[in-house]
Amino acid sequence: MKRRTAWLALLAAAVAPGCASYYYGDVGAAAGLQADLLQANQQAADALLQAARLDPRASVLVATLVNVDRLGESSRLGRLCSEQIAGRLVQRGVPVTEVRLREQLALQPAQGELLLSRELREVSQAHQAQAVLVGTYAASPRQVFISLKLVRPEGNLVVAAQDYAVPMTAELRGLLTGR
C-alpha cells in the first residue's frame, strides 16, 4: 500500500507541471522572454571579467552602447544595457564610476567603433579609470546583436571582448525606437 501511494504521488508530481502549463500557460516561458536581455547582459559582463585582468581597487567607466550604423546615436536599449552591465560589474566587486555625462561616453562617428574619443580618454583619466567598457548593438528582424569591448584608455588596447544576441521582441523594438 505504501509503495502504491508513493508511486501515485510521484506520478502526480511528474504530471502536475504539464497540466499547470496547459491550463494556466507557461509562466516560466513568459518570464524567460522578459529576462533574456538582463541575463544576457549579466553573462556578458561575467565573461568580460573572466577574460580581463582588472585591479579590484581601480574603477571602470561604462559608456553608453551605441547603434553600430550610427555611432553617434543610442536608444533606450543602449542606455539600459549599459546600466545593467554596470550593475553586474558592481555586483562582482568591480568599482564603477558613475558618470552621468553619457554624451561624452558615446563613441564619435568619425573615429570608428574601436577608437575612443579624446573626451573619453580625458574623462577616464580624470576619474583614474583602469578601463572603459564600450559597445555597439545592431537590430535585425529576429535578433539584437550586441558587441562589448573592455578597453584600456592608454593606447586604446582592447583587453576583453564579448559578442552575444538576444531574440527580438516587441519590448526590445520599443526600447530601440525610444530615445
Image (cartoon, rainbow, N blue to C red):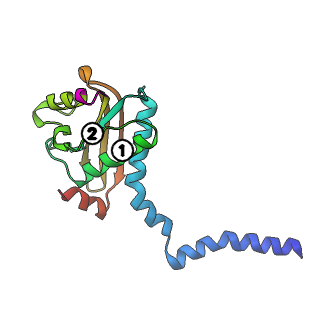
Task: Give the residue at x 47% y 64%.
Answer: 29
Residue 32 in view: yes
- Disc 1 vs disc 2: Cβ atoms closer than 8 Å? yes
Q: Is residue 25 left or right of residue 96?
A: right
Name the image quarter holding residue 117: top left
Please check the rendered image and state whether residue 52 is part of the magenta-colored stretch, yes or no. Answer: no
Q: Between residues 122 and 148, which one lies in front from this camera angle?
A: 122
Furthest toward the right, the residue is 1
Name the image quarter holding residue 96: top left
The quarter of the rendered structure image containing the C terminus is bottom left
**How many numbered discs?**
2
Q: Between residues 175 and 29, which one lies in front from this camera angle?
A: 175
Residue kind at label 1, given as amino acid type:
Ile
The boundaries of the magenta stretch are 125-129
Instruction: Please determine whether, in this image, residue 87 is positioned above or below residue 174.
Output: above
Furthest toward the top, the residue is 155
Mark closest to the chain's N terminus, 1 or 2:
1
Residue that label 1 marks:
85
The quarter of the rendered structure image containing the N terminus is bottom right
Residue that label 2 marks:
135
Q: Residues within 10 Å of mark 2 (few under 14, many from 20)?
A: many
Task: Give the residue at x 38% y 36%.
Answer: 95
Instruction: Please determine whether, in this image, residue 156 is positioned above or below residue 144.
Output: above
Residue 48: horizontal and vertical position, in percent? Answer: 40, 34
